[in-house]
Structures are given as C-alpha cells and as structure tokens.
Amino acid sequence: MEQQAVDKGDIQFFELAYLEVDIKQEKGQKVIVALKDFVIPNTELIPEEVRSKIKKWSDYIDYWAIDWDFQNDTFMNGWVTYRTRKDRTLALKSDPHIYEMAGKYTIMVKVVDIFGNDTSQAFEVEVK
C-alpha cells in the first residue's frame, strides 16, 4: 500500500462490526446458533436515506452463514440465510446441526452487511 494514498485519505480503515451470538447445545449432539446483536461502527458515515430505513439491528445484515467445523482455512457454508429483492426476511436462528461425533469443534459465523462488509467470528464448542 502506498503511503501517499493513505496520507491523502484515499484509503480509510474502519473498525470492525460487533457480532454477538448465542450457541445452544441440545440433546443428541444438536447445536443451534442464533444472532443476538450486530453493531456497525461509524454509523454517522451511513447516508441518511439508508439510516432512515433501519428500524432494528438486524436490518444491517444482508447474509449470514455458519461453518460448523471450521479448520482455520477455507470457510465452508454449512448453513446460510440471506435476503433477496423480493423476500427481505432473514432468519436470526439457524436450523439445528447434528454432529456425528462428540468432541471439540470451531464454529465460524460469517455476517455480510448491507454494504458488503464481511464480519467473521469463531466460537469453540464442545459437543457431548
């Protein structure tokens, strides 16, 4: 990256979004992930015509997905939900995922906001 571009303000770095999830383990090695909160920093940079349409925190989310067994390499969509132009609803709770074996797993949750920004967070879970 050229320092000149940074100095001129052509390149800007922003804080990452805040993501809060709830992971519930049920009988039979079943796990469900629910989004609880999503906060975009620097909301003052969002145009007023967009801000006026936002009624709740989930309105900022366009897509979210789960990799149920993240291996610190490629994200593999194991479950996904997204909005379309015709259907603007978005599930905030995943379908149950059943692990074949007990053990420790890394669940990676990826959220893409309405501006195309990706926020990912890993969570450790021990399936019994």
Image (spheres, rainbow, N blue to C red):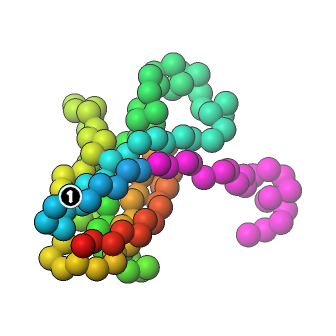
Q: Position of residue 125 (x, y in %)?
A: 36, 69
Type of amino acid under label 1: Glu
Residue 4, relative to residue 48: is it above or below?
below
Few, some or many C-alpha atoms within 10 Å of disc 1 (few <14, some 14-19, many ≥20)? some
Which of the two residues, 35 or 5, is positioned nearer the viewer here?
35
Work out whether residue 65 can be spotted. Answer: no
Q: Residue at x 40, y 58 (%)?
A: 110
| Count of marks overlaid on the render | 1
Residue 79 coordinates in the image, percent (x, y): 23, 59
Quadrant containing the C terminus is bottom left
Choose between 128 and 115: the one closer to the eye. 128
On whether residue 14 falls in the magenta region, the answer is yes
The residue drawn where x is 84% and y is 62% is 4
Residue 27 falls in which quadrant of the image?
A: bottom left
Q: Secondary structure at mark 1?
A: strand
Q: Position of residue 30 (x, y in %)?
A: 19, 62
Examine the structure image and report whether residue 11 is included in the region drawn in magenta. Answer: yes
Q: Find the magenta span and give its range.
A: 1-20
Q: Is residue 96 left or right of residue 110?
A: left
Q: Is residue 128 left or right of residue 7?
A: left
Relative side of 90 to 45, left or right: left
Q: Which residue is mark 1?
A: 26
Q: Residue at left 13%, top 66%?
A: 28
Quarter of the picture holding the N terminus: bottom right
